[in-house]
Amino acid sequence: MTDLWLDTLITATPQEGFELAVLLSRRSVKYAQPDLSILQKLRPEYADSTDALTAAAQVLALNFQTVAAANNYWRP
């Protein structure tokens, strides 16, 4: 994928930062597996998996940590 979509990690609020972290997490899945049909085929295997959901939450937390640090934790 060569489309440029991420201009900055800077956001106005922690809420916007969290939403950016969600977007980063979702986009990383698309980069790892760009074939939509395979993604759809595999979804039932991980949708109900506690381990898979925990791993997804960890990725999201790491992305939020990165965005928060880039924004100096929204301190003035």
Image (spheres, rainbow, N blue to C red):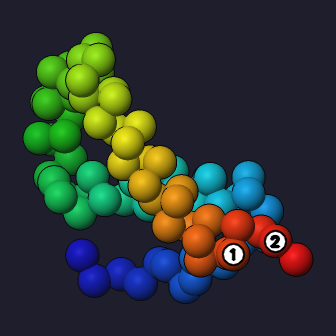
Structural crowding at the residue carrying mark 1, measured as other residues with C-alpha within 10 Å and reported as few (<14), some (14–19) or many (≥20): few
Q: Is residue 25 rendered to the left or right of residue 42?
A: right
User: What residue sits right under mark 1 in the picture?
Assistant: 72
Q: Is residue 12 visible?
A: yes
Looking at the image, which is closer to me, 19 or 43? Answer: 19
Structural crowding at the residue carrying mark 2, measured as other residues with C-alpha within 10 Å and reported as few (<14), some (14–19) or many (≥20): few
Q: Secondary structure at mark 2?
A: loop
Q: Position of residue 6 (x, y in %)?
A: 49, 79
Residue type at mark 2? Arg
- Count every numbered label the image shows and give the total: 2
Asked if residue 12 is positioned above or below residue 4 in the image, the reply reads: above
Q: Quadrant of the N terminus?
A: bottom left
Asked if residue 63 is positioned above or below residue 58 in the image, the reply reads: below
Q: Is residue 23 visible?
A: no
User: What residue sits right under mark 2 in the picture?
Assistant: 75
Q: Position of residue 59 (x, y in %)?
A: 36, 48
Looking at the image, which is closer to me, 29 or 65? Answer: 65
Spatial CA span between label 2 and label 1? 6 Å
Q: Secondary structure at mark 1?
A: helix
Callouts 2 and 1 close, C-beta under 8 Å: yes
Residue plotted at (43% across, 55% down): 62
Q: Position of residue 36 (x, y in %)?
A: 21, 47
Q: Position of residue 24 (x, y in %)?
A: 44, 61
Q: Is residue 20 rendered to the left or right of residue 52?
A: right
Residue type at mark 1? Asn
Residue plotted at (73% across, 52% down): 15
Place residue 56 in its image quadrant.
top left
Place residue 12 in its image quadrant.
bottom right
Q: Is residue 74 rendered to the left or right of residue 28?
A: right
